Amino acid sequence: MIRPSDYSLRPGLGYNTKRPIRAVNALTMIRPYSPSDAMLKRMSHRALNPMLKRALFILFCLCLMLAPALAQEEAVTSPAAPTRPPATLTLQGDGFQVEQYFGPLVQGQVGLLRLVGDDISEAHALLRSREYTFYPASDGWYALIVADIDAQARAYTLSVIVQHADGQAATVEGQVTIESAGYIRQSFTVPADRAFLTEPEVERYEFARLGVYTDPQTPQMLWGENRFTLPIDSEINSAFGLYRILNQNSITRHTGWDQRAPVGTPVTAMADGVVVFADQLDIRGNYVLIDHGWGVYTGYAHFSQFNVEAGMSVQQGTIIGLSGNTGRSNGPHLHWEVIVQGEWIDGLEFVNMWLPSS
Ligand SMILES: [Zn+2]
């Protein structure tokens, strides 16, 4: 678990802050070669002496030998989806098995479960009285379970209920331990002209409004083949999960991560998806929310300009707007957040975790 003091030491963060590299075909950038008549005459085979012919033949053979090697080099350097890591634990059921890809979950973390078996028609996981759907993918069924930010740190029973095509149901049980993330307190000053935004009622209303958009779970995986990336490439200046004391009178939680961003910084979609909200909110200001499928959403706050509207499909790297200072903000920055199964979770942990891809 990353602590606010060690973002720069986080392994893998450097990799994930890089923008996706778009392939450019260098050949399209070179003008077609058109030799003049005089050049053609000079290049005729009668003008070439036997030594030169031999040298050209050797050069031709070398090109033939090098071509496959160069092609191989190209294949190695092109971005590839990381392969599935080994499971940390396997639960054996009757005719199916459930693989667990996490150890103890820290508050705010997401755990990945993979289910394989014959004739499965649907399946659910139960943890802390919440039901999580398994979604089918090319190599099995997957569920994303959540250790929410306020979950009490202790061991919980995990149940997986599998429905077979013949109508038979089977259950297997395991255990999930949730650990404390040790979230700290931070004082946060909201400018006087926006102090009314520190009222708990304003926050309750905003969560209720957002819940309309973040509760539905699109059964298709929309994020494509790439893992999630950070929306801008800049320093992180406030961590997820902090208890924030607003103007010394009300307390709230920091639902995302903040990155430095002067007003007007282009902000990109963290993964492929569909924009479900691009409008003004009291606290988040001008806000964009993207549905990535399977109950995963990313949100981007305090924009100065929208480049997308609700209903638009976006790809990872699409510029969705420009950063700003709107809403309950105390200076220009980008606040971004990840919501999974209706819970605001630690987005940096999510960006770094392995996910199945389409
Ligand atoms: Zn923030």
Image (tube, rainbow, N blue to C red):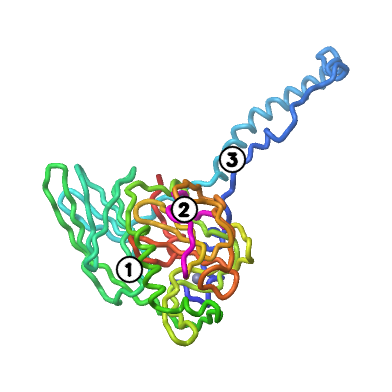
Q: Position of residue 97 (x, y in %)?
A: 23, 52
Is residue 141 inside the magenta stretch? Answer: no
Quadrant of the image occupied by residue 175: bottom left
Q: Position of residue 187 (x, y in %)?
A: 50, 84
Marks 3, 2: nearer the viewer: 2
Q: What is the CA distance from the residue labelled 3 to the residue labelled 2?
A: 21 Å
Q: Which residue is mark 2?
A: 227
Marks 1, 3: nearer the viewer: 1
Q: Which residue is mark 3?
A: 74
Q: Main secondary structure of the magenta part?
A: strand
Can residue 62 be seen here?
A: yes
Q: Please report contact status of discs 3 and 2: CB closer than 8 Å, yes or no.
A: no
Ranked by sequence position, the earlier of labels 3 and 2 is 3
Q: Nearer the viewer, residue 36 or 194?
A: 194
Mark 3 residue element: helix
Q: Which mark is residue 185?
A: none
Left or right, residue 300 beside residue 135: right
Q: Which residues are magenta?
A: 267-282
Left or right, residue 327 beside residue 176: right
The amino acid type of the residue labelled 3 equals Glu
- Mark 1 is surrounded, within 10 Å at the Cα level, by few (under 14), some (14 to 19) or many (20 or more) other residues, namely many
The amino acid type of the residue labelled 1 equals Ala
- Mark 2 is surrounded, within 10 Å at the Cα level, by few (under 14), some (14 to 19) or many (20 or more) other residues, namely many
Q: Position of residue 220 (x, y in %)?
A: 35, 46
Q: Which residue is mark 1?
A: 147
Q: Nearer the viewer, residue 196 or 65?
A: 196
Q: Nearer the viewer, residue 312 or 144?
A: 312
The amino acid type of the residue labelled 2 equals Arg
Question: Is 354 above or below relative to 241?
Answer: above
